[in-house]
Amino acid sequence: MANEVSVTPTFHTQKLESAFVTASLNLMLICLSILIIVWVIEMPDSKPSSNKPMTKNERVFKALMSGGSFNRFEASTLLHDSCLNSTVATLEQKHRITISRKYETVRGYMGNPTKCCRYWIAEEEIKRIEENQLQLNG
């Protein structure tokens, strides 16, 4: 059988398989994170609701208070906020809170690198906000 070809994994195919597994795991982690964030945002609070949908500011605040961090593209998709920088500025001024930020580079249109800002609330600030809310509420 002269036409048989022996296929043995080479270094390059093993490298590709490893990269595929890593990419698949990263994608699964991203999907799981998105599901958790959506679940936390849509989870009802302990106080009675008035059947009014949450405002954009409330959605973003709740997502950040739950430990989430977002850039403008993630916020657009997950929180339906098309101008996260303005929402963050409003939350900081209106509620006198500090929202942390750092610039990052992400894949943009056609895979080109795009700079954007990632926003989150630091753990210490979350504790401070929760303590102040307890003082205000009770």
Image: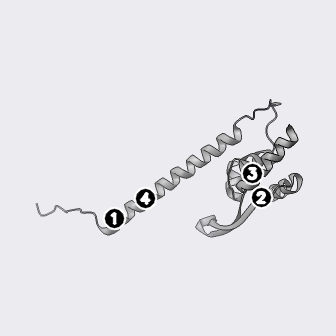
Q: Is residue 56 visible?
A: no
**Residue 78 pos. (x, y %):** 68, 49
| Residue depth check, mark 2 versus mark 3: number of the one nearer the observer | 3
**Residue 96 pos. (x, y %):** 86, 55
| Residue depth check, mark 1 versus mark 3: number of the one nearer the observer | 3
Kindly identify the amino acid type of the residue bearing the numbered disc 1: Thr
Q: Earlier in the sequence, mark 4 or mark 2?
A: 4
Q: Identify the residue under disc 1.
A: 13
- Residue at left offset 48%, top offset 58%: 23
Q: Is residue 123 or residue 27 the one in the foreground?
A: 123
Q: Identify the residue under disc 3.
A: 126
- Residue at left offset 67%, top offset 41%: 40
The reply to whether dot 1 and dot 3 touch (C-beta < 8 Å) is no
Report, in whole angstroms, how far the alpha carbon at label 1 lies from the one at label 3.
46 Å
Q: Earlier in the sequence, mark 1 or mark 3?
A: 1
Kindly identify the amino acid type of the residue bearing the numbered disc 3: Ile
Kindly identify the amino acid type of the residue bearing the numbered disc 2: Ile
Q: Earlier in the sequence, mark 2 or mark 3?
A: 2
Looking at the rendered structure, the secondary structure element under dot 4 is: helix
